[in-house]
Amino acid sequence: MLGKTAELIKASSFDVCHSRCTFDPRRMIYRPSYNGKRMNLFKVLLSSDCKFDCSYCQNAWRKGKTISPEELAAIFKAMKEKGIVSGAFISSAINADPNRVMEEIIETGRLIRKFHTGYLHLKIIPGCSKDHIKEGIEIANRVSINLETTSESRMSEISGVKLFKEDILRKQRIIAKCVERKRKEGYRKSHTTQIIAGLGESDEEILDLMNKEYIKYGVARFYISRFQPLKFTPFEKRRAESQRRIVNLYRMDALLRMYNYPTSLLREVMVDGFLPSIDPKILIAEKLVGERSGKTKNELIEANEFNGINQSTDLDVNFQLPPEMIPGCGKKISQLLREGRSLAEIKKKGYSIKRISAYSRGQKRIYEF
C-alpha cells in the first residue's frame, strides 16, 4: 500500500498549491506556504486513473492507481502523529462519474476532520453538483477547481470531454458565492484556480483571465503550471514551456494581486500579446519615468490617478513613481517610503536599495550603470 500511496503523492505534483512549493522525496511531503507560513503538506490523489482525455496528462493514457478514503485518512493520521505533516490537500483524477469522485474526496475530508482541525484543501471536480461543492467548502479551509486553459476554444483543443463553461466556469461561480457567504459568516475560507501555460495561449489571454478571476470570482491565488511534455500522451512531442515565461507570468500576477496595477499598463509593455523576458515591473517603470520626466509633483499625482493608481499626496518628491511601482520595492519598503524614511535609513534596516535608488530624481537609469 505504501508504494501505491507514494505513486499517488508524486502524481499530485501537477496540482499547484503554491508558486514556490518544493517536494521532499525522502519524506514524501510538499512544502508550500499558507497565510505566510511554511507547512509540511500531505498532498495526494485518491486516484490517478482517469476517464477524461486531456492531451497533456498521463492519467488519461495509462493504467492508474486508486486508494480508498479510509486508507488515505489513516496514512495522513499516522504521518501527523509522527509530526511529519501539518496539513492535507486531497485531489483525484476522474475515474468515475464526477459526483462519485467528489463524494470520495468529501468522505476523505470528513474522516480527516475527525482528528485534524488544521489546514485542509479539497479539490472540486469539474461537473460535480452544487450540493457537493457546498459540502466540500463546509469541510475544507480552501477549495480549488482548475481552469486548465484560458477559453472554451482552447479547452476544445486539449480535451473532447471537459466543457469549459458548463463543467468549470459555472462551478467556479458557485464556489465563489459559497466561499463569500462563509467568509461573511466569519469563517476563514478561500478558493484558488490554476492554468497550464504553454498550450498555445498568449500572455494577454492569461492577463485577461487572471484579472477576471481576481475581480469577478475573488480567487485567493491564480496558479500557473508550466507545460511539460509527458510520455504516452498526445502532446508528448510538443515543446516544453520555458521557466522564464512562468517567472514573468507570476511577476504579472503579483502586480495585479498585490499592487492593483491596471491591466492597461501591462498591455502597453507587451509585444504581440507577450511579455518580453525583462521583469514587467521594470518595463512599466522605465516607460512611466520616460513619460514623466520633468513633471511636477501634482502632475505626477494626476497622471497616477488617470492610470488608476492609488497614491497618497505625501509621496516623497524625490521619486517620480508611487513607491509600489518602483522596482525593488515590496510591501515593506513601500510602507517605509510612505512613512518618509530615507534610502539611507532603509539600507540600515538591511534592505537592498540598489534598484530603488536608480528611480530617485537625479540618479542614473539602471541601464546606464
Image (cartoon, grey):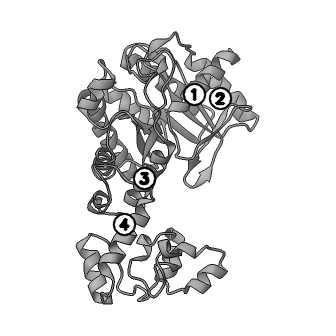
Disc marking residue 170: none
Look at the numbered discs 3 and 4 and tell me whether their residues touch, using CB distance below 8 Å.
no
Distance from disc 3 to disc 2, alpha carbons, whole Å, reads 28 Å
Badge 1 vs badge 3, beta-carbon distance below 8 Å: no
Q: Residue 311 location in percent, x, y? A: 35, 78
> How busy is the neighbourhood of tag 1: few (under 14 within 10 Å), some, or many (20 plus)?
many
Q: Quadrant of residue 136?
A: top left
Q: Residue furthest front?
A: 368
Q: Would you say the residues marked 3 and 2 are in contact, meaning their CB atoms lie under 8 Å apart?
A: no
Q: Nearer the viewer, mark 3 or mark 2?
A: 2
Q: Which residue is mark 1?
A: 44
Label located before the other in sequence (1 or 2): 1
Disc 1 to disc 2: CB gap under 8 Å:
no
Q: Which mark is residue 76?
A: 2
The percent position of residue 17, horizontal first and vertical second, equals 52, 40
Residue type at tag 1: Val
Q: Amino acid at mark 2?
A: Phe
Tell me: 349 left or right of 169: right
Work out how far the residue at label 1 is from the one at label 3, CA to CA, in angstroms: 29 Å
259, 113: nearer the viewer:
259
Label 3 neighbour load within 10 Å: few <14, some 14-19, many 20+: few
Quadrant of the frame with the C terminus: bottom right
Q: SS for tag 2?
A: helix
In the shown orientation, is residue 314 left or right of residue 28?
Answer: left
Q: Nearer the viewer, mark 4 or mark 2?
A: 4
Residue at the top extreme of this rendering? 63
